[in-house]
Amino acid sequence: MKPHYRLLRDAILIVLGCFLMALAVDVFLDPNDVVPGGFTAIAIFANRLRGWPTGLTLLALNVPFFALGVWLLGAELGPKTFAAAVLVSLAIDGLRPYLPTVQGEPLLYVAYGGLLFGAGQALVFRAGATSGGTELPAKLLEHFYGIRMSSSLLAMDALILGMAAIFFGLGPALYALITAWVMARVIDVVDVGFNASHTAFIVTQAPDDVRTAILQRLGRGVTILTGQGGFTGNQRIMLFTVVHRREVGALRSIVSAADPDAFMVITPSTEVLGEGFKPLTRLRRG
């Protein structure tokens, strides 16, 4: 993809993602005291305590950490992340007067709030950026103290969940936990689900037949590997291939028809790059 097309695509993804996150906060989450985690949750707490605008407070929390991160880490934190952090903050406050709210229906505001916020985050991630939040201090902790981002993010989310229980009660805090689960699942679907692929290892006595059928019927590449049976010590041929999720059934049929005694292992692949799949390009987040 040409650089200017990629830049336009990323800009569209960031704008759409920030709009969805703001929609989730204004319509479903904030009116029901359900926090989505991160700095957004802290901004909601500040709104309840001091009446400060949620979006502006979110921006005020992000800017110092972003500035510190750029100063200490350099280009690792780029302009796309800053643009996303600013845009989502402005959208939360700017759209609020024009949006309705959904209250009194926990199933609706938990499910749709998590769905929209998670989808928005996933779109921003696909643009190679983040919307700021606790990822910024987590990145700094990892850089200077060697604390893994996953560990520090988990600790911060647990702290925020505890604060939500104190501020809003146990019920909204538990709803926030469900919302976080929905968000995580949606991010997985948007990030890899639509392009989900599966890796297959096939040990067969008819490698030529299986290989030819995969090449002709699925149009997928096949790598031939030589192995040795651990029990018999005999040399065996193993085929390696990657197929789209919708092609798994056809792959089973192909192998079964060519060699009913074959041994096949099929596993989900988080990401597949290269010929026939996503281009093998290095994506930089920021």
Image (tube, rainbow, N blue to C red):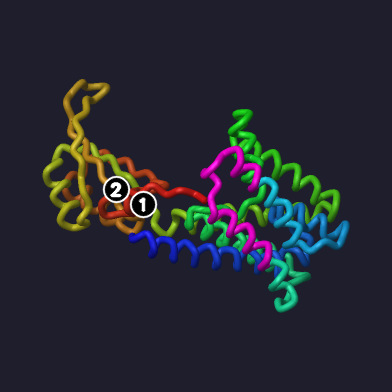
Q: Callout 1: 10 Å neighbours few (<14), some, many (20+)?
A: many
Q: Residue at x 26, y 45 (%)?
A: 241
Q: Amino acid at mark 2?
A: Val
**Magenta stretch mostly in which secondary structure?**
helix
Quadrant position of residue 266? top left
Magenta highlight on residue 14? no
Relative to 66, residue 72 above or below: above
Pointer 2 residue: 242
Q: Residue furthest front?
A: 71
Mark 2 or mark 1, which is nearer the start of the sequence?
1
Q: Which residues are magenta?
A: 66-91
Which residue corresponds to the image point at 23% horizontal and 37% vertical from the top-left?
Answer: 203
Q: Residue 282 versus residue 197: which sits nearer the camera?
A: 282
Q: Is residue 221 left or right of residue 4?
A: left
How many numbered markers are drawn? 2
CA separation, marks 1 and 2?
Answer: 7 Å
Closer-to-camera residue (148/249): 148
Residue 21 sits in quarter: bottom right
* Residue drawn 36% across the image and 51% down it: 197
Q: Position of residue 60 (x, y in %)?
A: 73, 54
Give the structural element (helix, strand or loop) at label 1: strand
Q: Split into 4 quadrants, where in the image is the N terminus?
A: bottom left
Residue 284 image offset from top left, x and y in percent: 45, 48
Q: Which mark is residue 197?
A: 1
Q: What's under tag 1, amino acid-wise? A: Ser
For mark 2, give the secondary structure: strand
251 and 25: which is toward the camera? 25
